[in-house]
Amino acid sequence: MARPPGMSVRLKLTLSYAGFLMLAGALLLPVVWLFLLRYVPDQAVTVPTEGGTDDMMRSPYLFIPGRSDLWSAFAPKAAAVLVFLLLCGLVGGWFLAGRMLAPLGRITEATRRAAAGSLAHRIRLRGRRDEFRELADAFDGMLGRLDAHVAEQRRFAANASHELRTPLTITQTLLEVARKDPDRDLGRLVESLHAVNARAIHLTEALLVLSRADQRSFVREYVDLSLVAEEATETLLPFAEQRGVTLETTGDLAPVQGEPALLLQLTTNLVHNAIVHNLPASGWVRVTTRSDGAGVELVVENTGAVLDPGLVATLTEPFRRGTDRVRTGDAAHDGSGLGLAIVASIAAAHDGTLTLVPRAEGGLRVAVRLP
């Protein structure tokens, strides 16, 4: 927004300092009048001195000046002092304002660099804590978060482009083969194209859910997380039975303020991820909800392979998969590599936390805590 030019803050502070100093000096004049000059007679008085003329150096009369005489002698000196105070206020105020506003100049320069795209710059303002240091530290923290967010978005965009390019490339290859081989089985071609297209649609929907959670573009309402967990487990129960995984749901009422569809997506992703990464047979998945004075907690545990803690720490990154697994051929259950990334984003959008801990016996324990 274009703004008309105006006085700088330094000049305003300088004029304020000088003005207050002049005001303090000017207030001394009525103080002198009230507490000194009012005890002086209006007219000059000559009073005879005691002792006569014994002392030749002493005048026989004592002259007491009047109020006008004192004022005539005091006024020029007072005016000179006021001029001196004005000059001191302007010079000293300009110097002090410059010293005080120096950190603001560094913050402004860092802001311009950030606006130009340089998010790696930090102010790192030294000195004891005050308002400018708190502002600089908050600005450095914001730049750090923005830098990390931009880097993550760039990495995510590159991964998403790669993941979306794969089904398009496969589709183009299948069509090229079909064009060159007219005798190819069209039924298998259509089935392959359908599977590839379904995977692309599933990935696109996951990206949209992730973007919606990141932007927090939803209205909060009352949701019982225990009912959401039951709905998610009922939906995935046939898939769990197909893979020989036992699915259990227990827990108490867990009321939260959130968006029902996103919380259902969060729970479904956790349960689905626990089923897919389970043991081939005789495995189990336990879904538990609990509530306390600080909030509610959703815990999803599953059996499975023993996981490296270093690997577990990276599972919430987009397009990261915990273990290599054989695809089922069903796009709805093969996954897109965004399951836990979506869970982390939805939890953060609801001001919650996500904790992943590998189980010593194998498998994973995932806890989502919401206020």
Image (cartoon, rainbow, N blue to C red):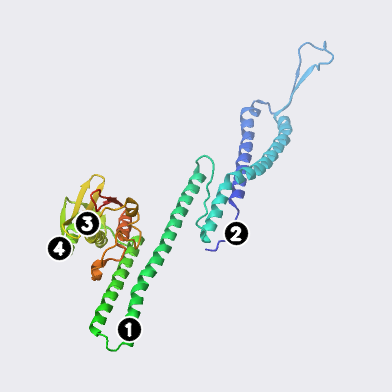
Q: Could you give the CA–CA distance between mark 2 and mark 3, rounded to whole angstroms? A: 53 Å
Q: Which amino acid, by three-letter code, is at mark 3?
A: Val
Mark 4 residue type: Glu
For image coordinates 51% across by 45% down, the residue present is 133
Numbered disc in front, either 4 or 2: 4
Name the residue tied to disc 3: 223
Amino acid of disc 2: Pro
Query: Considering only order in the chain, which callout, 4 or 1, is on the residue closer to the N terminus?
Result: 1
State the separation of the CA atoms marked 4 and 3: 28 Å
Q: Nearer the viewer, residue 280 or 44?
A: 280
Local packing at callout 4 (Cα closer than 10 Å; few below 14, some 14-19, many 20+) is few
Residue that label 4 marks = 241
For residue 279, side relative to residue 313 (left or right): left
Q: Circle 1: is it few (<14), some (14-19), or many (20+) Cα within 10 Å?
A: few
Q: Residue furthest bottom?
A: 182
Instruction: Measuring from the top left, give residue 239's x and y in whole percent.
Output: 18, 65
Distance from disc 3 to disc 1, alpha carbons, whole Å, reads 51 Å
Mark closer to the chain start, 2 or 3: 2
Q: Position of residue 259 (x, y in %)?
A: 26, 60
Disc 3, SS: strand
Q: Where is residue 284, by image quadrant?
A: bottom left
Tag 1 residue: 177
User: How much space separates mark 2 and mark 1, taking CA atoms?
Assistant: 68 Å
The numbered mark, 2 or 1, whose residue comes first in the sequence reads: 2
Q: Could you say which quadrant of the image residue 184 lies in?
A: bottom left
Give yes or no for contact between labels 4 and 2 (Cβ–Cβ under 8 Å): no
Residue ID for mark 2: 5
Q: Please tell me whether mark 3 or mark 1 is closer to you in this view.
A: 1
Q: Are marks 3 and 1 in contact (CB under 8 Å)?
A: no
**N-term mark: 3 or 1:** 1
Residue drawn at (51%, 61%), measured in percent from left and top?
117
| Badge nearest the viewer, 4 or 3 | 4
